[in-house]
Amino acid sequence: MTLGPVAYPAELTSTSQRATTLATNLRAVAENVSDAHTRLQDGGRPADWEGEASEAADHAMTVVVADLDAGVAALEQGSLAMDTYAAALVSLEQRFVALVDEIDAVNAQVAAHQSDRRTANAVPDADTTLLDQQQGQLQSATADLRARVAQWEADARSAHEEVVAALQRVDTVAEGDDAARAPDRTDAAGLADDLQALVDSGDPTAIAGFWAGLDPAERQALTIHSPQLVGNADGVPVADRDVANRTSLYSDVDYLGQREADDQLSRNEADQLANARSTRDVLDDYRDDIDVTTGDHLSNLLVYKPGEHGGNGGVALSLGDPDLADDVAALVPGVTSEQSSLAGNVSSMDRLLTEADAQNGDRSVATIAWLDYNAPSGEPWNPDDLLDVVQDSGDLLMTTNELFANAGGDRFADFVAGLRASDEQAGEDGGGRAHLTAIGHSYGSTTASYAATAGMDVDDLVLIGSPGAGEGNDEATDLLASGNVWVGAAEHDPITHLGNPGRIGLGHDPAQDYFDAHRFEVDPGSYRVEDLFANHSSYFDEGSDSLANIAAVTTGNDPTLVDGRTAPGALTLPALIAGSSAASAGEQLVEHGDDLLRLLDPRGILP
Amino acid sequence: MSHRPLVPLVPLPRPGRRLHGTLVALVVLGLVVGCTAGGGGDGDESDASAVEEYDARVAEVDEVVRAVVGAALEELGGSARGGGTGAHQLCGDGPRYTGAEYRASVDLSSLRAGGARTVEVLTGAFEAEGWTVEPGPTGLEADKDPLGADLSSGAGGRQLVVRSGCVDTSHDTAVEIADRPAVDLGL
């Protein structure tokens, strides 16, 4: 038998990303149809109608309700079929990557063997015993590999045929009716009631167990019936929350976009549509990014509440899957933590993911931007908008106390508990219990501190640019009993000088030596007064000491530590403001000294 | 898109505490100056030139992505799954952003070659474009200051990301740039 290289598998005709997108779109349509069905079913004919016209209307509505239900049933099955197809494609794509690696390795051995054989053939009476043995082994290896390539191609064809057949089973009105009337059809409303009760009880472990007990058809029906409930339920697996939240998102963009086109948007709906679009834009930015560990898409929408927090919206998005990753970091941003500021925070988490990936070798990482609390607004007042003035001025006043941080801390602790529950449900197949780090920036550091005192289950807590670690927290062990509290405080970041002993902040400055946290090295930042706020916004800058050290904590490595601040001799806020103002003025003087001299001495009399 | 200047976070004195009015005023003044002064530039003129620089870097990133991925497809076969996406992102932690960065990403999991061969071909392609290439933790890292790239590989696939590096701008300009829609690179 001749020995030759193994051919690569044929390319897939579709991709998991496209199949997932189609499944999401089908679900979004299904949700809108389901909503219409529920509204008509619950509303029906007006109660005060009577007579033949009333009966005719009743009949007509019954027919429409039945038709809509048939549509929902068909779309449930269609989207489930696409989900199954997408999962099969992810598996095929993973196998493709492994197969081409193996083919390259075996083909290289074949080429080397053939070269050795040609050399041996050129030598009369050469002993080819070893070469013959090697050829036998290679023939066996290539035959095995060709069989697996053939199996892969057969599985690809089979997956394609199955999805086509599944879609054809519900592609007529009659088949939709049959699906709607099937005796084993899932009672989605009943499941939604069960899940809502668990959510109300605040037990993410019970939610994780409930979800694990559902079959795929039940999950699909429940997701289409109540995507907001499923997507925001702490304890539901990350991948399924993402599916549910994308369903809500694309349904909102479609429905509210149409109302906008019809000039019917209320103010609240306009806020929701803006929030939905800003979230969709971030997902679009990452539409071609995969998690190279799993082959799934990189971004996961963990929270989607476009109408929450007075119209600011609530959202959380991960890069990587926290249920499967070895190391997970979740960021709580500060002021303007609202849905529209998701993009900037995800960019920061992208940089952290890249740096952490570079530091931790084979361990996998996921990062999360969590913006699901009523943070004070950093936006200014718009004098043309009275409501905006009232709302934002109220918000700004709220930065003077810790109410938002306290309430937000509770929410964040619940969110983390949900991550722990779904991670535990994923078990060892999901890589075991993740090393989890919470990161609070600015006002978010106070929020994260409150989460810690509320019992947040994290391994490490990072506070950066902190105005204070919350009232009543006198030292690091008040936040985490383990004392694994890490602090990044740029020397020229004025916000970090507000906490005690600065006395106008939100509790103790955690960078103080007496607080006994681990203070890591951070670039001090510019000493010009006009740059001070930029210093507060530079903790995730690419190439910075700060980013490297936050990544070190995230991956369980050792950051570079520096001494904590000590009261005598430490830079204070007044000194920073005065000194940096003087420095800026000095620079201006140097830059414009000649102009100043001409002004003071226009005739050039001075020597 | 808001063109309003930011009001910074400045915790005000709590009732019953000693007022630090002068101090607070100084912080407000200092930070407002910081917020409105842009990224250390000189207003509109500086921002216009920053946008020009940003657009030039976008073109440079797109060009190298087309060259490198094109070389890989030609030499190895297969496809760039999804066609690649170029996205405009923010720099800085917020609420005040300090610049913008362009990020192009391409899923190379469908190349008809294993990881080692892919790295070899991409290394040659980047070097032909004048980039410096080093082995990365799971693939390669390439650099042509201020641009950077990395290829990461795992059991789930291979991903190439090329970045423009941050271009300093004012906050408002950064947000305007980041509001641009993601583009399909059509690879």
Image (cartoon, helix red, strand yellow):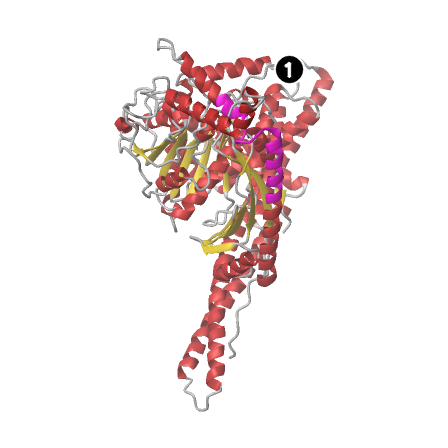
**Does the magenta segment cover residue B48?**
yes
What amino acid does circle 1 point to?
Ala
Whole-percent x and y of residue B156? 48, 52
Q: Taking A304 as reference, is A424 above or below it?
A: below
Q: Toward the viewer: B72 or B147?
A: B147
**Camera-nearest residue between A344 and A187:** A344
- B17 vs A141, left or right, is left
Of residue B125 and residue A569, the one placed in the foreground of this image is A569
Residue A208 lies left or right of residue A475; in this view the side is right
Q: What element carries label 1?
A: loop
Residue at image mark 1: A47
Query: Residue A574 versus residue A514: which sits nearer the camera?
Result: A574
Q: What stretch is highlighted in magenta?
A: B31-57
| Circle 1 crowding by C-alpha within 10 Å: few under 14, some 14–19, many from 20 | few
Whether residue A319 is visible here, answered yes or no, is no
- Among the 4 quarters of the image, the one containing residue A200: top left
Q: Mark 1 lies on which chain?
A: A
Q: Residue A420 at what x, y percent from top left? A: 37, 36
| Image position, residue A128 (x, y; %) | 42, 84
The answer to whether residue A120 is seen in the rendering is: yes
Q: Does the magenta stretch include residue A522?
A: no
- The number of numbered badges drawn on the structure is 1
Q: In this view, does A524 lie above or below A311?
A: below
Residue at 52% across, 19% down: A310
Q: Where is residue A170 in the image (x, y as percent from the top left)?
A: 63, 43
